[in-house]
Amino acid sequence: MTQGRARLYFLSTDSAIPLRNLPVAPDPRPKPSPKAASMHVINLKAAWEASDADSDAPPIRVALPLDWAAIPWPDGRPPARARLARRFGRPPRSESPAPPRILLRGLAGVIAMGLNGAPVAWREEDGWHVVEPGGLLPRNILAIEVDPTRAAQAPGAWGDPAFLECGRLRAGPLGLPGGRG
């Protein structure tokens, strides 16, 4: 649309009513900049691997939200420390000036978190575990060490929702996409 006045045409199926040409005011809303539209979100709900943090037993494929009582642990009972791991790639448009963030909700019993084999700090904010990893590699592994007993005793769904956010499109609670919070 060009600056100034645009024309809107109305068609009629009745031949007695002429075609109208009415002026329309330009849209006053600002156009989003390309940088504002650089939000990229990766859903981290599926493809997690649960394992005993103190054992070499093969991992069990799980999805979030997680029901800790339903995991078929090899020896029939939960381990003292469980490890959840999730692989993910760096978003294709990660040149956003806003740093990437991993956002997880409902994580009771978290002992430690790691990214690509190194410990990573997190903060709790309005019920969310927020990890700001800085730069991401082309392929990444997020690992969460959990006390399954404490996690199973907590109310609500464990790990729902969970996603990686790169860039910020609009501000809601925590600047989350869609204003979720």
Image (cartoon, rainbow, N blue to C red):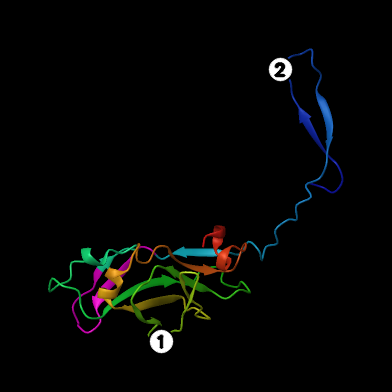
Query: Among all residues in the image, which is located at the extreme right?
Result: 4
Q: Amino acid at mark 1?
A: Pro
Q: Is residue 22 left or right of residue 180?
A: right
Residue wearing tag 2 = 13
Lateral position of residue 142 relative to residue 181, left or right = left
Mark 2 or 1, which is nearer the eye?
1
Residue beneath the point at 17% across and 71% down: 73
The residue located at (32%, 68%) in the rendering is: 154
Q: Nearer the viewer, residue 164 or 149?
A: 149
Give me the disc on residue 119. 1
Position of residue 10 relative to residue 16, above or below, is below
Query: Which SS does the magenta portion mostly show?
Result: loop
Magenta stretch in the rendered image: 45-60
Residue nearer the viewer, 129 or 169 = 129
Q: Can you tell which quarter of the image residue 95 is in?
A: bottom right
Q: Disc 2 vs disc 1: Cβ atoms closer than 8 Å?
A: no
To which quarter of the image does residue 54 belong?
Answer: bottom left
Residue 161 at x, y percent in the picture = 42, 63
